[in-house]
């Protein structure tokens, strides 16, 4: 009985222990499960926050990349727009230039038509007056013949015989005496005047040399001057109107142009572009435009200084920049502006000695070579170009004739022209004034004559006017008038192709027919 109760008590104790253990284990499991759920929720929340932060970072990076792409696109678009705008501006400038040229051509065409109409009217009027004059002379001759009962030749012979008989002896002696005395006095007086003018004028014995090179620091800069596929050098040559020669010579670029002012503008522009380093078509046009404006101001300044030095304050303003252009022009190494000032002073000294107006001589001397400032832009010799320019400004006859006739191409009509010719020769021939030696000068004249005599039908050729004109005498039996014109043109073309010379050379072909008979 007791053992049974003990067994029952043990069983009940075991059951109670098992129940308590079960309850403990269950409570512990629920606590662990609760904590695990909380940890899982916390982990999930943390993962969600991290994912959101990562998404924001990715979105921010994407926006930054988008902003960079947009800025790059805007820069490229702006550059393209600027380039397109520059192209449009250049096209607009070219269109304006073409419009102005068309307007100028239209005006010239209209002017030529008006001149042609006036010339036709003048020709008709001159023909009518010539016919009237011929008829009037014939009527007078007929009346004289009726009155005197002699022909024209008989009357002329009688009159000449009478005058010759009366004046032959006395007039011959008087004329010879006066002529000899005048020649002696004129030679002595002219010699004294020229010597005094030379002694009173002291000039530097130097000659100018034309420099047309630009120093380039490196071969890389040469490549930048040329540009991709020659774009830069073509733009530079087109804008400045010069030729740029780039060869294997290290560190040197040659600028070539017959117009010294354009060559100087190109040289200064190229030096500035090389110093700046930014070389492209738009920059080239900008620099050349700025230098051209500065050059216009410099030419005006040089002209004003020359006028002040020559003491001629009343010269018209259009003459001043032309005088400035002469400062960049040389003749055999002699600066033309300095030469003109020398001629002005020498002519004044000689004019004062002769009792003429010194101011007029000084004015004619300063302006006598003004055509050399424009002979690169207009056809014809510099005397004619300068005279036409000064005539438009209403210059006096003394200045116009000195400008046109100072090389002896036309007769002198005023006493100032011989003075300018003498002063011109003195200034050009003084020691050190010009680089060309006498040997080279004579050689050039001989080459000119020999070249002209190489053509069929040419008998003789003479170079005159210091090599500015060649006169060709052809055989009248072998050459007619039409062939004479062709020979003149062919000689001029051959001179252009084979010789180097300043200014221009006039070719005159003369054909003379002589008929000779003998009376036996």
Image (tube, rainbow, N blue to C red):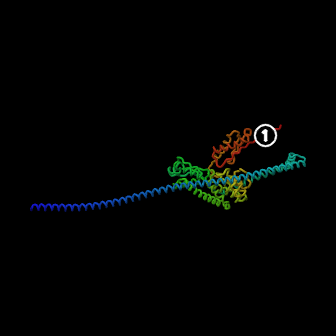
Residue farthest toward the front in the current orientation of the protein: 1
Image position of 516 (left or right of 195): right
Asked whether 313 or 246 is in front, the reply is 246
Asked whether 505 or 13 is in front, the reply is 13
Query: Is residue 462 something one can see in this rendering?
Result: yes
Q: Quadrant of the C terminus?
A: top right
Query: Is residue 195 something one can see in this rendering?
Result: no
Where in the figure is residue 141, as x and y percent of width and height?
86, 48
How many marks can you see? Answer: 1
Asked whether 225 or 49 is in front, the reply is 49
Label 1 Cα crowd, 10 Å radius (few <14 / some 14-19 / many 20+): few
Asked whether 61 or 434 is in front, the reply is 61
Residue farthest toward the top in the current orientation of the protein: 520
Q: Quadrant of residue 370?
A: bottom right
Disc 1 secondary structure class: loop
Image position of 140 (left or right of 71): right
Image position of 284 (left or right of 106): left
Image position of 66 (left or right of 406): left
Where in the figure is residue 376, as x and y percent of width and height?
64, 51
The residue that disc 1 covers is: 515
Q: Is residue 459 above or below residue 79?
A: above
Q: Quadrant of the N terminus?
A: bottom left
Where in the figure is residue 61, as x and y percent of width and height?
41, 58
Where in the figure is residue 148, as x and y percent of width and height?
90, 48
């Amino acid at each position: 009985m007791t053992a049974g109760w003990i067994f029952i008590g043990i069983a009940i104790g075991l059951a109670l222990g098992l129940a308590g253990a079960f309850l403990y284990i269950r409570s512990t499991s629920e606590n662990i499960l609760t904590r695990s759920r909380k940890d899982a929720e916390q982990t999930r929340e943390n993962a969600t926050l991290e994912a959101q932060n990562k998404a924001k970072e990715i979105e921010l990076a994407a926006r930054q990349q988008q902003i960079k792409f947009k800025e790059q696109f805007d820069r490229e678009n702006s550059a393209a727009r600027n380039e397109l705008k520059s192209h449009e501006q250049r096209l607009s400038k070219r269109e304006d230039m073409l419009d102005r040229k068309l307007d100028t051509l239209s005006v010239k065409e209209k002017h030529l038509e008006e001149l042609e109409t006036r010339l036709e009217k003048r020709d008709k009027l001159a023909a009518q007056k010539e016919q009237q004059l011929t008829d009037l002379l014939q009527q007078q001759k007929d009346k004289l013949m009726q009155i005197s009962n002699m022909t024209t030749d008989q009357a002329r012979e009688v009159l000449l015989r009478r005058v010759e008989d009366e004046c032959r002896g006395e007039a011959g002696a008087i004329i010879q005496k006066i002529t000899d005395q005048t020649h002696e006095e004129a030679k002595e007086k002219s010699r004294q005047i020229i010597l005094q003018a030379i002694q009173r004028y002291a000039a530097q014995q130097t000659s100018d040399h034309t420099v047309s090179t630009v120093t380039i620091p490196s071969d890389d800069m040469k490549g930048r001057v040329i540009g991709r596929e020659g774009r830069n050098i073509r733009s530079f040559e087109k804008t400045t109107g010069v030729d740029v020669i780039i060869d294997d010579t290290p560190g040197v670029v040659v600028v070539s142009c017959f117009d010294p002012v354009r060559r100087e503008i190109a040289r200064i522009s190229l030096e500035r572009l090389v110093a700046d380093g930014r070389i492209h078509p738009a920059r080239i046009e900008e620099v050349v435009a700025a230098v051209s404006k500065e050059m216009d101001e410099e030419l005006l300044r040089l002209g004003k200084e020359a006028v002040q030095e020559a003491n001629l304050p009343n010269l018209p303003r259009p003459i001043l920049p032309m005088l400035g252009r002469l400062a960049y022009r040389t003749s055999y190494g002699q600066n033309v502006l300095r030469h003109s000032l020398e001629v002005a002073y020498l002519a004044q000294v000689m004019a004062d000695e002769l009792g003429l107006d010194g101011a007029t001589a000084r004015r004619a001397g300063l302006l006598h070579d003004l055509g050399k400032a424009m002979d690169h832009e207009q056809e014809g010799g510099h005397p004619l170009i300068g005279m036409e320019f000064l005539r438009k400004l209403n210059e006096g006859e003394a200045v116009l004739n000195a400008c046109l006739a100072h090389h002896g191409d036309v007769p002198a009509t005023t006493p100032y022209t011989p003075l300018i010719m003498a002063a011109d020769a003195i200034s050009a021939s003084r020691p050190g004034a010009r680089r060309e030696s006498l040997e080279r000068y004579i050689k050039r004249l001989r080459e000119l004559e020999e070249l002209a005599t190489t053509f069929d039908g040419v008998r003789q050729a003479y170079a005159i006017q210091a090599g500015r004109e060649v006169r060709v005498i052809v055989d009248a039996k072998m050459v007619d008038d039409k062939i004479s014109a062709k020979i003149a043109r062919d000689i001029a073309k051959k001179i252009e192709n084979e010789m180097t010379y300043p200014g221009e050379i006039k070719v005159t072909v003369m054909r003379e027919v002589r008929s000779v008979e003998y009376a036996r």
